[in-house]
């Protein structure tokens, strides 16, 4: 098998739970040598289940078995001087250090120490903390996903379209917020490697979990900054139909984003008379009347089986999906046809099926790598190699010279990581624009290829609109996720347009699209054609279902993927139906995974001169997000229950009501010490003295009573007051922040997270910015989202090399419509 894209890199992971562990896994399965540094008792990840036969064992925890693949394990006690000294020897010869946790804990373990970077000036240190390394509050609080979701604004919005205001905000199943952080850590690390290859040396990357989560809360931020509207989990969907239908043998999720999809759905139903009602006149009118339209659809389809309707509607390109359970996902004909799943045989855990490659790369295939290591399994191997290698001054001298490709040279550290990289951006709606925005933030020249005859749905159809003026340039959703790009307006169907696009691609490094399977080849822009134009081109196609397989032609919007991957079936209130997770999460997840793949491919190209094709299925890229569910089903034989915002293994954890209207607090209490601190803080000496609650198992067994006690205390207090009191006691507790709270949050303001940039029609509009800070490479949002065609002449003149006379001739021929 060909070497991975990151072969030759050494990565040290000092993870705590999911964020750093997932970032390191991605790098390891791209070929990097990942050494997982663990304390004597092991990463807490090992104590997370599910466990085979329900028997807790630090070697067999399901999340560890998944997230620690493609790594070696080394035990070092970084709380001691001896452990830190040994660690510094390893860091002197490493390329990357990835870690996550509270700033105080990272500092105690020597992971923020400038001496690490002094010993190895090329070391890239990527640290994920709740609010950033310089945050004034909660520097020693444990890092917990539910509190980060609350601080980042996602929790407030979930599950969406809720009718009962008494139901609390709902945490999505698993550790979704920290998967987001892990993806940002991988993106930032790969970008820093690119900067290092240009002579910037190593640097410290500071990632705020709050900012990473806030950067993807969809149009909740623009709704507030454009219109002053506070979006929430309550109310109606913007468009209709949207929701779950109860069919003869299960549940089907359906949404029509465009009028064309609605008409195709009606055609399938035989164009019923009720569809002519003014209540269903267009997509925005159907939103407030969604209950009525869903009732009519349910009446028409309730006696039909799910799979029949799913395939029949998808054959007509109507977005829908079964609400899958874990058994359905594991049995998927499509995933198995694409060879997606992998099996690892572990000496303690046995053989299980795991999510496989989020991408298929033509030149540097993703590699499953080794199975998860036993604790300390590679101590002798790693330390023996370290003792026999260069140390001290010799290692430092060796580390000062980066490995440069033949075509690079030393440049100032102020050079942006992707300076000189050009992207021909054919993407639209959400997933693709999220990918290309990451590249733009990192310095790439992203040229968005657009047409007035087929506007990006983000421009044309998704509110809010600046000052109520609906134009192709005033949409807050589009303006949020297209920052930093240029717009080339061109009619791709015009006979002369392809010549211009070919010239653009000849001068580009990356071509990106998120169309359905086969669309780019049918346009004459398939990879084989692109290679003839530019031999070292990197092309990424992000179809919902990938470029092959029996369902490759199906429509895969983000909301449809939530039920398809099984996340909806795992998320919900106790005893209630499956629920959504408020945002088009799989779109954002796909965009971030796509950025990781492109940056890894660029790393390979800098060393080899070789481009490649990346086939990224958004479905497959989302499968890591439900690894816990898949393994739980296999290990127990049962679909994991929906458990509201509780944790499967620790207690208490949840969302609790506070004084005032619709105010909530989220907390997670995951250790015996935290439990004692919590009950002291809420004045419950009786609970502190109760021996049955002194252990995790005891607390899980009495979770209802514990939640009632916490809720009684929080109801009497303002959310901010309650959260501050609990944080002072050492508990990870945060107010469930609204979009208004986010925009006014001093922690985000201190990181210069919010940006206001000049725009042809929306100057003064505020948007979310960057979740990462680089210590040596100055990154910022460089420009507002472009107006339609704003840079057409500029691109034709500066990139393609056309004269003013040639441009005028082409305009007269209606090429730029």
Image: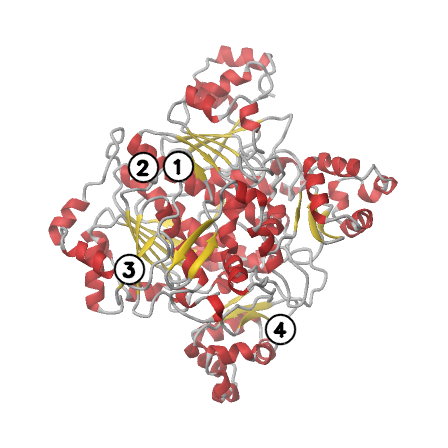
Which of discs 1 and 4 lies nearer the camera? The answer is 1
Q: Are marks 2 and 4 in contact (CB under 8 Å)?
A: no
Q: Earlier in the sequence, mark 4 or mark 3?
A: 3
Asked if residue 581 can be seen in this view, the reply is no
Q: Earlier in the sequence, mark 2 or mark 3?
A: 3
Residue 659 is labelled as: 4
Residue 443 is labelled as: 1
**Residue tagged by mark 2?**
415
Is residue 72 toward the left or the right of residue 562 in the image?
Answer: left
Q: Nearer the viewer, residue 287 or 545?
A: 545
Query: In the image, what residue occupies the spot 47% across and 53% down?
Result: 354
Is residue 499 toward the left or the right of residue 386 in the image?
Answer: right
Determine the residue located farthest toward the right in the rendered image.
273
Q: Earlier in the sequence, mark 1 or mark 3?
A: 3
Report, in whole angstroms, how far the alpha carbon at label 2 lies from the one at label 4: 50 Å
The total number of labels drawn is: 4
Q: Earlier in the sequence, mark 2 or mark 4?
A: 2
Residue 373 in the image: state x and y as whole percent.
34, 59
Q: Nearer the viewer, residue 393 or 722?
A: 393
The local secondary structure at tag 4 comes to loop
Q: Earlier in the sequence, mark 2 or mark 1?
A: 2
The local secondary structure at tag 1 comes to loop
Asked if residue 375 can be seen in this view, the reply is yes
The local secondary structure at tag 2 comes to loop
Q: Are marks 2 and 1 in contact (CB under 8 Å)?
A: yes
**Residue tagged by mark 3?**
111
Residue 447 in the image: state x and y as whole percent.
48, 29
Which of discs 2 and 3 lies nearer the camera? The answer is 3
Report, in whole angstroms, how far the alpha carbon at label 4 lies from the one at label 3: 40 Å
Residue 516 in the image: state x and y as whole percent.
58, 34
Vertically, is 421 above or below 336? above
């Amino acid at each position: 098998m060909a070497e991975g894209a990151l072969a030759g890199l050494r990565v040290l992971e000092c993870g705590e739970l999911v964020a750093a562990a997932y970032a390191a896994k991605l790098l390891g399965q791209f070929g990097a040598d990942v050494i997982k540094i663990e304390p004597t008792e092991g990463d807490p990840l090992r104590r997370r289940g599910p466990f085979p036969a329900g028997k807790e064992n630090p070697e067999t925890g399901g999340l560890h078995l998944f997230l620690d693949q493609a790594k070696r394990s080394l035990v070092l006690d970084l709380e001691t001087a001896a452990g830190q000294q040994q660690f510094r020897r390893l860091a002197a010869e490493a390329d990357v250090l990835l870690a996550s946790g509270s700033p105080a804990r990272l500092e105690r373990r020597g992971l923020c120490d400038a001496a690490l970077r002094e010993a190895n000036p090329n070391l890239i240190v990527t640290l994920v903390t709740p609010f950033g390394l310089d945050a004034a509050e909660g520097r020693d609080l444990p890092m917990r996903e539910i509190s980060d979701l609350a601080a980042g604004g996602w929790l407030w919005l979930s599950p969406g379209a809720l009718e009962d205001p008494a139901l609390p905000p709902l945490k999505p199943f698993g550790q979704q917020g920290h998967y987001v952080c892990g993806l940002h850590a991988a993106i930032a690390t790969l970008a820093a490697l690119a900067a290092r290859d240009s002579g910037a040396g190593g640097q410290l990357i500071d990632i705020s979990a709050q900012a990473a989560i806030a950067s993807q809360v969809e149009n909740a931020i623009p709704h507030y900054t454009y219109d002053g509207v506070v979006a929430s989990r309550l109310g109606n969907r913007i468009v209709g139909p949207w929701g779950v239908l109860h069919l003869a043998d299960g549940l089907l999720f359906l949404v029509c984003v465009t009028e064309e999809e609605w008409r195709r759905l009606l055609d399938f139903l035989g164009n019923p008379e009720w569809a002519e009602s003014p209540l269903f006149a267009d997509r925005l009118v159907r939103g407030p009347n969604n209950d009525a339209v869903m009732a009519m659809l349910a009446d028409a389809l309730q006696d039909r089986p799910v799979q029949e309707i799913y395939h029949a509607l998808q054959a007509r390109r109507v977005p829908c999906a079964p609400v899958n359970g874990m058994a359905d996902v594991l049995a998927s004909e499509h995933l198995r046809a694409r060879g997606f799943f992998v099996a690892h045989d572990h000496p303690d855990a046995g053989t299980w099926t795991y999510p496989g490659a989020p991408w298929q790369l033509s030149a540097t295939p993703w590699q499953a790598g080794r199975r998860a290591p036993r604790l300390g399994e590679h101590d002798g191997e790693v330390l023996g190699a370290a003792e026999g290698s260069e140390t001290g001054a010799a290692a430092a001298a060796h580390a000062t010279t980066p490995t440069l490709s033949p075509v690079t040279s030393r440049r100032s550290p102020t050079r942006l990581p992707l300076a000189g990289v050009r992207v021909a951006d054919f993407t639209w709606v959400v997933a693709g624009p999220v990918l290309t925005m990451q590249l733009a933030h990192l310095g790439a020249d992203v040229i968005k290829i657009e047409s007035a005859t087929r506007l990006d749905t983000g421009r044309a159809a998704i509110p809010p609109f600046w000052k109520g003026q609906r134009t192709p340039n005033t949409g807050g959703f589009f303006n949020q996720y297209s920052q930093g790009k240029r717009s080339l307006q061109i009619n791709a169907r015009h006979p002369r347009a392809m010549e211009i696009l070919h010239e653009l691609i000849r001068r580009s490094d990356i071509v990106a699209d998120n169309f359905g399977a086969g669309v780019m080849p049918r346009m004459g822009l398939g990879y084989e054609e692109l290679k003839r134009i530019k031999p070292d081109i990197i092309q990424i196609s992000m179809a919902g279902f990938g470029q092959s397989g029996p369902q490759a032609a199906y429509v895969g919007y983000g909301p449809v993927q939530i039920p398809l991957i099984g996340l909806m079936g795992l998320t919900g209130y106790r005893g209630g139906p499956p629920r959504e997770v408020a945002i088009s999460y799989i779109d954002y997840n796909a965009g971030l995974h796509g950025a990781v793949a492109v940056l890894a491919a660029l790393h390979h190209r800098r060393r080899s001169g070789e481009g490649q094709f990346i086939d990224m299925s958004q479905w497959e890229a989302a499968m890591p997000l439900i690894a816990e569910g898949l393994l739980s089903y296999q290990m127990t034989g049962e679909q994991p229950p929906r458990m509201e915002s509780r944790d499967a293994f620790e207690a208490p954890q949840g969302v609790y009501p506070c004084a005032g209207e619709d105010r909530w607090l989220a907390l997670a209490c995951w250790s015996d010490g935290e439990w004692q601190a919590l009950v002291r803080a809420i004045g419950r000496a009786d609970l502190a003295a109760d021996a049955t609650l002194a252990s995790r198992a005891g607390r899980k067994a009495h979770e209802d009573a514990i939640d009632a006690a916490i809720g009684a205390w929080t109801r009497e207090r303002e959310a901010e007051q309650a959260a501050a009191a609990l944080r002072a006691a050492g508990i990870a507790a945060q107010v469930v922040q609204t979009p208004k709270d986010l925009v006014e949050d001093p922690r985000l303001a201190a990181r210069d997270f919010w940006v206001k940039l000049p725009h042809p029609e929306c100057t003064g509009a505020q948007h979310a910015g960057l979740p990462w800070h680089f210590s040596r490479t100055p990154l910022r949002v460089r420009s507002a989202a472009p107006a339609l065609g704003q840079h057409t002449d500029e691109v034709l003149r500066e990139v393609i090399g056309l004269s003013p006379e040639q441009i005028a001739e082409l305009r007269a021929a209606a090429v730029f419509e």
